[in-house]
Amino acid sequence: MSIIAKRYVRALFESFGDKELANVQSALGELNSAFGIAKFVSILSAPNVSKEDKKAIVISVLKTDDKKLVNFIALLSEHGRLLLLPDIYKEFEFQISLKNNRYEGKIYTDKEISKEQAESLQKSFSKKFGADINFKVEKSNYKGIKIQIDDIGVETSFSLDRLKAQMSEHILKAI
């Protein structure tokens, strides 16, 4: 994560009140989605497009009349930092998670997990870390179960292959 993005996010948190931060989050989320469009990124990257035109394009995607947010985009444009918006959004999301003590995690497995099992894991991890943790289940090739909560740096797994290897090793040592 760019230290520059962190500074801009800190400025956003200082400029907007708690109630306004939800609107900023929504607006930045829409902008972040636009970065998934190759043509949008190429326009912002193009050296032959003026800073004013780039600013106008980003503000048109923003769909807001909030003067502080428009001024924020103007500031980014003026300093040639519009391409930092995805990093700014990611850092903003992280800071909101810290502020609300709410985190997103992922469960990777090759088996189906019931909603009740996922909720049980959410409750256990929420209790263990004293935070509100929500999991998304993703089907993968991982033989076992792997849980990741990137924002708090947690990764835990139970692999059937690893268990088999440990059991074989234990049996061989016993012989």
Image: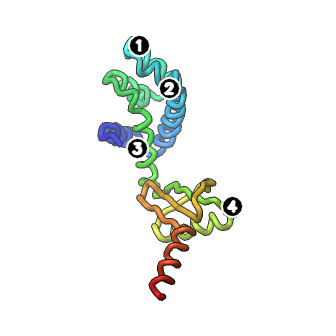
Amino acid at the residue labelled 1: Val
Which label was assigned to residue 65?
Answer: 2
Going from N to C along the chain, the mark reached first, 3 or 2, is 2
Q: Which residue is mark 3?
A: 91
Residue 78: name its quadrant: top left
Whether pointer 1 and pointer 4 mark residues with C-beta atoms closer than 8 Å, the reply is: no
Residue 173: name its quadrant: bottom left
* Residue count near mark 2 (Cα–Cα under 10 Å), binned few <14, some 14–19, many ≥20: few
* Residue count near mark 3 (Cα–Cα under 10 Å), binned few <14, some 14–19, many ≥20: many
Placement of 106 over or under 60, stated as above or below: below
Mark nearer the viewer, 3 or 1 = 1
Placement of 34 over or under 146, stated as above or below: above
Query: Which structural element holds mark 1?
Result: loop
Expressed as whole percent of the image width and height from the top left, the position of residue 23 reads 51, 38
Whether pointer 2 and pointer 4 mark residues with C-beta atoms closer than 8 Å, the reply is: no
Q: Which residue is mark 1?
A: 49
Query: Which structural element holds mark 4?
Result: loop
Expressed as whole percent of the image width and height from the top left, the position of residue 99 reads 42, 53
CA gap, disc 1 to disc 4? 49 Å
CA gap, disc 3 to disc 1? 27 Å
Query: Which structural element holds mark 3?
Result: helix
Going from N to C along the chain, the mark reached first, 1 or 2, is 1
CA gap, disc 2 to disc 4? 45 Å
* Residue count near mark 4 (Cα–Cα under 10 Å), binned few <14, some 14–19, many ≥20: few
Q: Which residue is mark 4?
A: 112
Q: Please tell me how many numbered marks the rendered image carries.
A: 4
Amino acid at the residue labelled 2: Asp
Left or right, residue 82 beside residue 3: right
Expressed as whole percent of the image width and height from the top left, the position of residue 136 reads 59, 55
Amino acid at the residue labelled 3: Glu
